[in-house]
Image: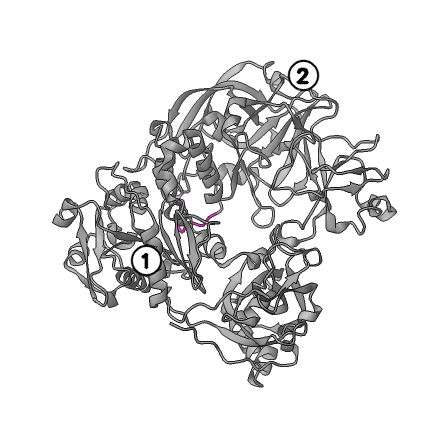
Amino acid sequence: MTTTLPPLANLCESCRVLELDDSKWPAYIGGSDSGGYYLDIVKEHLKSGRFHLDYFVLDSLPDLPDLSNTAQKGCDFCSVLKRAIQSCARDSFNEVVVSLFYQCPISEESGDGGQPIGIQSLVAQLLWTGYENNGDHLIRSTWLRFDLDSPPGHVAQLLRLESPPRDEALCAENIGMILRNLKQSNHIRSSEVGTVYPTRLVDVGLEGTDLCRLIETTSDASFKRSSDIPYATLSYCWGSPEDSALQFKTERSSLHSRLSGFRIDQVSPILHDAIRVTQALGVRYLWVDAVCIIQDDDDDWDRESSRMSYVYQNATLTICTAASTSCQQGFLGREWIATRIRFQSKCNKKVSGSYTLRLVGEVEEGFHAAVDSLSLALSHSYWGLRGWVLQEYELSQRALIFGKTKLHIITENGFQSEPKETIETSECAPGTLYIKEAQNGYYREYLNFLSLIENYSTRMLSNRSDKLAAISGLASRSLSAYPGNYLAGHMFPHIDLFWTAMIAQIGTRLTKTTLIEQLQSRESYIAPSWSWASRNHLVAFGDGRSSLVSIESDFSDVRAECDIVQSRVLPAGLNPFGGVKYGGSLVIRSTVVPISLHVQLFPMLGSNIRLCRATEEGQYVTNLNFDWNDSEDAKSFEELSLVLLGSRKAENISWEPVQVIYEHELVDQSEQLESDDNMKKFPNTVPTVIIKGLPAGARAMRDDERLVYGLYPDQTNETSERVRMVESIKTGNSSTDTTKAHRMAPNKTSMPSVLGSGTPKSGGERYAYGIIIHPASEPGKYLRVGVFHSVPRERGGLDYFRGYPARTVEII
């Protein structure tokens, strides 16, 4: 199967910038006549991986008259760009500004003699402007990503472009690639629930068959005789309520007709394509929730959702529909919006030809343009951001990903993307890990589950009531060693009750009053206030900047300082890891300290946390993180109390505030720190780190984001891989330090520390942590409304809490 290339584009004067002039790039030509040539970009001159083009368009919505005019005159790219912008335009915006840049994937090995850097995509940065109905000004940025590809040849080699995808997703070459990977994979089935099969499956018949039927495996003779019958599962998005209402599904009234049989032209587009994939691979059976679960039978839904982990784990493969956003949208169609651009190398006259710009779609963050097509599908597609999808993918031993431009097959051995011939190992199907959990060790499984919850908390759910059910399969597999300990998403209260509400500051503002009303509402109840599942935003285990436990050895440093007297969490249905009934509670006996302390608010750190500290007689006691982000007044802190959960060793931890400076902000490393302007901008009053690269999202860093407090590696320790600092810088006193993590020493006039000044207490001291509670409307009961951690400085640390008596409190 070949790939049909679009015609060469006619371009207007503005769009001629798309025809790459490699002589203007910060690059040099590598290679030879015999081995071919490639463009090796000097990474130091292209740190963001972006090469901006001299292109600027301001146009009116919705008609885009300027782009329409040039498109009518024959500019093919203006026509493509117009269609792409109109496909994602919102009614509230009336103008859009467009700029363009080419994006290269940048890695530590790329450039300057390392792995050559190729050109990955063209990105149209869109700045949308308009007005709300109330007259408020609106502004928003999104990005349109066009992937670059070219058939094998001199242009593809020079620019390091990938080969184009094939015209048909289910062509013989792609089917062969999938089957080879499946054959080389070792599929393991588990029968811990008494059977290796789901309760029901769709019999799709042989390839070309148009008749399907629902079967019940418990009564089908062939499934009783064998435990090796292959079946596929489908992971997809139901879509909007309107689309979901039209979904082809099984209900009590239609169960008999589904068992009798149905035609393929009756089903939803997403199921139609999944049936065709299953047939093409020679797999006879398919599991899809809409048909295999009786949708209006609560008992059946609870029972089947509790078996979800085995449904996906035992499947021959999972069909993942990253190219689709709804059950009413298929994923096999390849009607791309694309155009082809001429290329004539100015650096090597022998190289000429063309490359294709193929629209992938709109992405919400600029850095999404720099990731590879598989990562884009797994982590940044609409499908990849859905709540249910996390466990469906995580539990699968083989996954077939249908992306916007390519398909990918993933097994435990690695992944292969069309049309490549090689298997890469940077992504492997994770499902096998849950089969071998006994070998991995329980602590490792528990840590993995906490990490998955943090990931899951960022995802979207159409029904908030699915919050615990949609992760129940992963919970049952990850925490199967102690299933009786599971409490609304928690296992070890002295560790995992210490989670931080990472409330984005850009967006909805939440006051304490509103938070308390929401937590006590029976109508919106999902879980008790102490559970992460009670919140509809990102959560992080720990204080939001560091975790209590991140490796197995950390568990020995943590100690419980509370007793769970009683727990009461009742499942809402038959799934013990699923939703819970209203009224769950924890009765805890521990040290309880009323907040009669002075509370001081500090500037926002990034976009998620507002730092507070409590002092007593001017001395530091503890740091506070509240579950609201809009403080009404000082009364916000009345009636609050601290409940001690645990403590942790504090050796080899630096608690000083750290000032962050990005390397690109310094004009000259050896001299700029001494300049008056730079010292005014970055006063040398606290320990400072200079970091390579750019802030998240490559945006400017606000001054109030530069101070980071709390857990931070001591400079005698190895620096974190997540923060790569310059190897050497020259400080104001002209001394040179070549350590991996260089800190500029503060001058003698040090600013007051948020965590308290002075030296740490004795090495045996521990820092304390716990939750913040507020009285509920029901007398004698409390709500969780935040967390605290207290480090052993001044009055802080575990010793402070030992001065207060223990109490018993019930938290709902």
- Residue under pointer 1: 179
Q: Give 268 or 394, whichever is nearer the viewer.
A: 394
Q: Main secondary structure of the magenta part?
A: loop
Horizontal placement of 101 versus 378: left or right? Answer: right
Image side of residue 23 versus residue 470, left or right: right
Can you give x and y, in whole percent of width and height, for residue 299 in the image?
A: 24, 42
Quadrant containing the N terminus in the rendered view: bottom left
The residue shown at (33%, 63%) is 175
Q: What's the amino acid at mark 1? A: Leu
Query: Residue at the bottom extreme?
Result: 73
Give the side of residue 752 with respect to residue 413, left or right.
right
Q: What element carries label 2?
A: loop
What colour-coding does the image apply? one colour
Residue 626 seen: yes
Q: Is residue 764 above or below residue 129?
A: above
Q: Which residues, given as a range, are shown in magenta?
A: 459-464
- Where residue 240 sits, quadrant-wise, is bottom left
The residue positioned 46% from the left and 21% from the top of the image is 588
The residue positioned 12% from the left and 48% from the top of the image is 221
User: Which residue occupies the foreground of this view, 305 or 166?
Assistant: 166
Q: Distance from label 2 to label 1 (Cα)?
A: 62 Å
Rendered image: mark on residue 786: none
**Is 462 part of what is drawn in magenta?**
yes
